[in-house]
């Protein structure tokens, strides 16, 4: 299985429009960017997209214009699903998978499009093109939000891009001892956000969970480019 980070940014992205902070200026000078967080799972010749943010068209063009066979949504925030409309008149609309409240909301926004919808209860694994996925609840108030556990060929990946650190114990079990953890790190350690982790909280939790490898995602323009364990747009993992 191959997993590629298509984006590692927050709802605003980096560089931020109209911003002249050091991180945004460095992004302009270096040609760097953080598109909205999403990633692509490639297995058995199929492409499964986790999140379909508003940068979707750009992301797909950057990484070879892959045909997308399925889309998974973790919650109904703009930066995690609103790009789904980019598939219109480009390819057959992919089938979608999400917990029932998430699927109802997101598919309601795109009710003018025809596509297959698969509601999946949290904690119930499902197979998709040889990969096992499981949604699990995480705290990201007020939105109903889930993380995602991925398992294939004995390898395990955990993902929770929008979450506080006080994840329920039952959900933490999906993130323990994973081979790769993708974790929300919205802001630097000196910031504290009520519904997200900062960089220090994310790193501390990743180490407590004994992740073999981890990458911070869903980062704002406040996060410096030179910190350890940051995910980068385009980064590829072969598992």
Image (cartoon, rainbow, N blue to C red):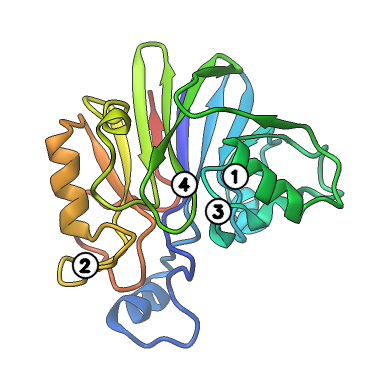
- The tag earlier along the polypeptide, 4 or 2, is 4
User: For this view, does 4 lie left or right of residue 106?
Assistant: left
Q: Residues within 10 Å of mark 4 (few under 14, many from 20)?
A: many
How far apart are labels 3 and 4 at the CA level?
11 Å
How far from the left and from the top, in percent, is residue 37?
A: 47, 53
The quarter of the picture where residue 226 lies is: bottom left
CB-based contact (under 8 Å), mark 2 and mark 1: no
- Gap between marks 1 and 4, in whole Å? 8 Å
The mark lying in front, picked from 1 and 3, is 1
Q: Which disc is residue 188 wearing? A: 2
Which of these two is toward me, 237 or 152? 152
Residue placed under numbered mark 1 in the picture: 102
Question: For the image shown, how many numbered marks are present on the structure?
Answer: 4
Earlier sequence position, callout 2 versus callout 1:
1
Q: Which mark is residue 80?
A: 3
34 or 189, which lies in front? 189
Give neighbour class at mark 2: few <14, some 14-19, many 20+ (Cα, 10 Å).
Answer: some
| Residue 44: percent from left, percent from top | 59, 17
Q: CA distance from mark 2 to mark 3?
A: 22 Å
What residue would you read off at disc 4?
145
């Amino acid at each position: 299985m191959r997993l590629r980070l298509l984006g590692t940014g927050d709802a605003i992205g980096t560089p931020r429009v109209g911003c002249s902070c050091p991180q945004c200026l460095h992004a302009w000078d270096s040609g760097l960017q953080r598109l909205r967080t999403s990633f692509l799972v490639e297995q058995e010749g199929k492409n499964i997209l986790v999140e379909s943010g508003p940068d979707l068209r750009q992301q797909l063009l950057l990484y070879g214009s892959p045909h997308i066979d399925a889309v998974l949504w973790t919650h109904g925030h703009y930066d995690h699903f609103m790009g789904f409309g980019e598939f219109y008149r480009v390819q057959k609309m992919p089938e979608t998978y999400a917990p029932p409240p998430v699927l109802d909301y997101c598919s309601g926004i795109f009710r003018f499009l025809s596509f297959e919808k698969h509601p999946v209860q949290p904690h119930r694994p499902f197979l998709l093109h040889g990969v096992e996925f499981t949604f699990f609840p995480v705290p990201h108030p007020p939105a109903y939000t889930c993380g995602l556990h991925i398992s294939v060929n004995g390898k395990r990946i955990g993902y929770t891009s929008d979450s506080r650190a006080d994840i329920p114990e039952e959900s933490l079990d999906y993130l323990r001892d994973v081979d790769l953890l993708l974790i929300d790190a919205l802001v630097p350690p000196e910031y504290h956000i009520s519904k997200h982790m900062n960089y220090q909280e994310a790193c501390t939790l990743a180490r407590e969970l004994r992740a073999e490898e981890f990458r911070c995602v869903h980062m704002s323009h406040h996060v410096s480019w030179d910190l350890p364990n940051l995910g980068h747009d385009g980064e590829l993992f072969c598992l």
